[in-house]
Image (spheres, helix red, strand yellow):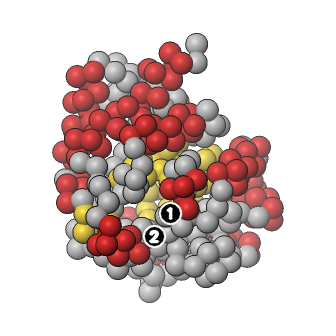
C-alpha cells in the first residue's frame, strides 16, 4: 500500500491529506469574488489565456450576483446533506484572486474566515499578481488559518506558454514559488495535459520540473475546449490533435510515477460543464477516468514517486 493512502489509491489524494490533517471530512467551497485578471484588462495581456471561459475558469464557483456569504452557504447546505460534520475551506476560484488592493482582499478573505467551521482558504492566482504588500498580508493570514496559494503554470515550455497566451515566464513562476515558500505559505500548482502540439514527453517534463521545486500540491487538468473561447476558434481552424482518454490515463500514470511522493494530488482530471464542452467528450465521465487511473497504477504495480525516487537516490 502507498504510504499516504488508506484505500486503493496509489497516489497522495487531497481527501487523505485533509482527513489526516484536520481529523475530519473537509470540502472546498468554490467562490466568485468578482475579481478580474491582468491578462484580460491589458496590464500584462489582453483576451486572457486562450482556454479561459467567460467565468474565468470558475465554472463551479458561486453566483457572482450574490454576496460571498450567500454563495458559501448555498454550497455548504448542499454538502452538509452528505457530510453533516464536515469542515470547510473557502476556495477563491474564478479569475485572479490576489489582483486587487490588500484592503479589498482582506475584506473578502476574512468575511469567509469568520464563518463557522472554516479551517482555511485556497486562493487561485497568477505568479505575476502577488506584490510585496500582498505577500506580507498572506504571510500574516497564514499564521491564523490554513492557507494555500494555487498558482497557474500549465506548462514549463515557453513555446506552448506563448501559444496559449499565458503572458508570464517560467522564471516569474519559479520566483513566486520561492517567495511564497520563504514565508512558509503552501503552494499548489495547476498544469494542463493535452495543450496544443505538446508531446507526452513534454507533459512529463513539466511534472519532473515541479517535483524538484518546494511545492505542496498539484492539480492535473485535461485541456477542455469550451464554447465561446479563443481556443474553440483555433480548434475549428486548425483541428490540432487531442489526446485520447487512453493516452490521458497513460500520461497521468507516468506523471504520478515522476511526482515526488509528498506532493498532494489535489486534482487529477478536468471537470467541465457539459453544456460548455466542445471536446473532448470523454471528459464528462470523470469517475470512470479516476477508476481507470487506479486500475492502470495497479496493473503496473506502481505508485506516486517510484521513478522520482529511482532518479534521485
Mark 1 vs mark 2, foreground winner is 1
Residue plotted at (29% across, 18% down): 301
Residue 200 at what x, y percent from top left?
Answer: 38, 40
Q: Residue furthest top?
A: 313
Q: Mark yes or no: residue 144 visible.
A: no
Is the N terminus in the top left, top right, bottom left or bottom right quadrant? top left
Q: Residue furthest bottom?
A: 65
Placement of 209 over or under 282, stated as above or below: above
Q: Mark yes or no: residue 247 visible.
A: yes
> Label 1, label 2: how many angstroms apart (C-alpha)?
8 Å
- For label 2, the SS is loop
Residue plotted at (66% across, 73% down): 44
Residue 113 at what x, y percent from top left?
Answer: 59, 63
In the figure, is residue 143 to the left or right of 309? right
Is the C terminus in the top left, top right, bottom left or bottom right quadrant? top right
Front residue of 223 and 19:
223
The reply to whether callout 1 and callout 2 are in contact (CB within 8 Å) is yes
State which tag comes first along the sequence, 1 or 2: 2
Q: Which residue is mark 2?
A: 50
Q: Residues within 10 Å of mark 1 (few under 14, many from 20)?
A: some
Front residue of 137 and 74:
137
The image quadrant of residue 211 is: top right
Front residue of 286 and 185:
286
Q: Which residue is mark 1?
A: 163
Q: Residue furthest front?
A: 238
Q: Of the numbered discs in the image, which one, if any, rests on residue 70?
A: none
In the figure, is residue 108 to the left or right of 239? right
Placement of 13 over or under 146, stated as above or below: above
Amino acid at each position: 500500500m502507498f504510504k499516504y493512502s488508506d484505500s486503493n489509491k496509489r497516489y497522495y489524494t487531497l481527501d487523505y491529506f485533509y482527513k489526516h490533517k484536520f481529523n475530519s471530512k473537509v470540502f472546498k467551497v468554490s467562490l466568485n469574488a468578482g475579481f478580474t485578471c491582468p491578462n484580460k484588462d491589458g496590464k500584462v495581456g489582453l483576451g486572457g489565456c486562450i482556454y479561459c471561459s467567460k467565468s474565468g475558469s470558475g465554472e463551479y464557483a458561486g453566483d457572482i450576483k450574490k454576496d460571498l456569504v450567500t454563495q458559501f452557504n448555498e454550497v455548504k447546505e448542499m454538502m452538509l446533506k452528505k457530510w453533516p460534520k464536515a469542515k470547510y475551506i473557502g476556495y477563491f476560484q474564478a479569475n485572479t484572486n490576489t489582483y486587487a488592493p490588500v484592503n479589498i482582499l482582506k475584506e473578502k478573505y476574512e468575511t469567509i474566515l469568520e464563518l463557522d467551521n472554516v479551517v482555511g482558504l485556497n486562493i487561485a492566482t497568477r505568479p505575476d499578481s502577488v506584490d510585496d504588500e500582498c505577500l506580507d498580508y498572506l504571510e500574516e493570514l497564514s499564521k491564523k488559518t490554513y492557507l494555500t496559494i494555487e498558482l497557474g503554470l500549465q506548462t514549463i515550455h515557453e513555446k506552448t506558454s506563448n501559444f496559449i497566451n499565458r503572458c508570464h515566464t517560467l522564471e516569474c513562476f519559479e520566483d513566486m514559488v520561492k517567495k511564497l515558500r520563504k514565508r512558509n505559505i503552501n503552494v499548489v500548482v495547476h498544469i494542463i495535459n493535452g495543450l496544443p502540439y505538446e508531446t507526452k514527453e513534454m507533459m512529463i517534463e513539466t511534472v519532473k520540473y515541479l517535483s524538484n521545486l518546494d511545492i505542496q500540491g498539484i492539480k492535473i487538468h485535461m485541456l477542455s475546449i469550451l464554447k465561446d473561447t479563443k481556443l474553440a476558434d483555433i480548434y475549428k481552424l486548425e483541428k490540432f490533435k487531442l489526446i485520447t482518454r487512453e493516452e490521458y490515463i497513460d500520461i497521468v500514470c507516468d506523471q504520478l510515477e515522476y511526482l515526488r511522493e509528498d506532493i498532494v494530488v489535489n486534482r487529477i482530471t478536468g471537470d467541465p460543464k457539459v453544456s460548455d464542452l466542445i471536446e473532448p467528450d470523454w471528459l464528462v465521465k470523470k469517475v470512470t477516468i479516476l477508476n481507470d487511473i487506479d486500475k492502470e497504477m495497479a496493473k503496473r504495480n506502481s505508485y506516486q514517486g517510484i521513478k522520482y525516487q529511482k532518479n534521485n537516490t
